[in-house]
Image (cartoon, rainbow, N blue to C red):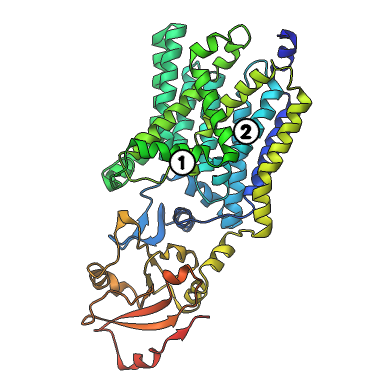
Amino acid sequence: MNVSAARERGGIPARAFWPGVFGVTAAFSLFCLGVEYTPDSLHYLSVARGLVSGSGLSGTLLAVDTAMPRPLDLWPPLFPMAWAALLWLGPDAAVITLHLLCFAVLAAALFSMAPEGQGARYLWTCAVLIVLYRPFGHVAAAAWSEPLCVALLALALAREVRGADSVGRSFLVGVLLGLAVLTRYAALFVLPGLLWWRFVRAREAGGPRRHAVQALALGAGLGLVVAPWFVRNVALFGRALGPPRAPRGAGLVSSLLSGVDTLLGEASFGAFGVLCVAATVWLLMRAPRGAWSEDLPDAALERLRPAALMAVSYVAGLFWTATRTQMDTLDGRLLAPLGVGLVPVTAAVLVSLVERSRLMSAPVLVTTGVVVVAGHLWAPLHARVRQPRQGFNHLRERIAPLPAWVEAHVTERDLLLGPQLWWVHPFSRAPVVADGYPERGFLTRQTLGPYLRQHGPAYERFFWVDTRPPPVDAAAFEAVEVARLGTNAYWSTVWNAVWEIRPVDRASPADGAGREAAPAP
């Protein structure tokens, strides 16, 4: 090995670092050309608007069980806070700006982990892998909290990899990890891996007391950040992580198969997934690397062991949780934080192998990287050009004509009820009851009537949006169809008409003139 050449590449020059950050950010801008909104996204937006309006960490959606603005219960607060800070740009522009900043921070943090002697080659390899890691692109295309979480995790891991050998630096790692937890609770899964790394390093370097103090400082930083939120959750819901979820029937095997299928995915991504896993296992196992000890600079790669341990710890935490509670499928969204550990390890191992290969010269590597990245980015670019997603405008078109009817006929003194109306509440001046979240109850024949009798005096009119009339007692309420909605094939199975629910003791003969069904605009 040419030691002098390695030393020349030991530091990443600014002329490579900043173009690398810009290139990664520009690549992810293709995924962010349009923002997709999901029920989680809309609840985040509801809370962000509540923060801007001064109503605190409660959205404009009403909970079925309390008839009050639904508090931030299943989700941590940091992402809606960040969204609220940028909401003056508009919902779509705020999310796109925040996502691009997060991926710039992610790239910069992962670049800073370069092992000694790899320099710019590690940087460009890492940049290519960041773009190719499919879960990153998956979360970049939606208004979700994962980009902010992976950026904070990357900052914490970069500080750990570069050396957190003092109480102050360990405390900073804990603070950054705590902020990641306040973005996604799943970030807690990396904590066992980092603590295990501290234990391993203490055994290897000696001085267990000093390392124990640093581990306590890490825990103090984490606890200082998350403790207020966890105390709030215990006071409101009785649990630090919010309301309990339903138990899961699937076992470890089915959860494992789901995660493996997501990580490997289609054939085009399968080789990359296998490569990431193999590189991580190779770095953690001394025996396979022992036979290569004369050829590979193990000491330079040792600094990335916390990244590998973090990845293993995160996966173990996901699978353990999936066997105990009802959670989302182990899809690209849940696997995005895993890339914070997999990508730098894979980049470093690839550079170490390629530098000793007589077949892979620098021009060959550059050409290969450009071709692979261009092919990977062609699909999202082609999809955006042919069918661009334009955030709120796209959402309005998807559920038309209901938003237009709500804006034209519903006032802030009314109340909207019905299934899946979280899709409509961004366009409604009236409060919307969030029927359909299992944790907060459903509007049924047993619950709708009591709900209206108890909370009805606060509103002038009640509108029910569904495919069937509202499930109310005819002796107490009168349901009058006021609009027929010509929605598309999918949404016609969710809503196709609007009914006004009129309590019998409020009805008057003058109301009869308005009982003809009105067409939607």
Q: Amino acid at mark 1?
A: Leu
What is the quadrant of the N terminus in the image?
top right
Q: CA distance from mark 2 to mark 1?
A: 18 Å
Q: Give the percent coordinates (x, y) of residue 150.
A: 52, 37
Side of 50 where 304 appears, left or right? right
Residue at 76% across / 32% down in the picture? Answer: 367
Residue named by callout 1: 334
Residue 122, quarter of picture: top right
508 over 428 or under it: above or below? below
Identify the amino acid type marked 2.
Leu
Q: Secondary structure at mark 1?
A: helix
Percent x, y of residue 511: 35, 90
Q: Which residue is mark 2?
A: 129
Residue at x-position 35% and y-position 34%: 320
The image shows residue 460, relative to residue 78, as above or below, that is below
Question: In this rendering, does residue 514 appear at all?
Answer: yes
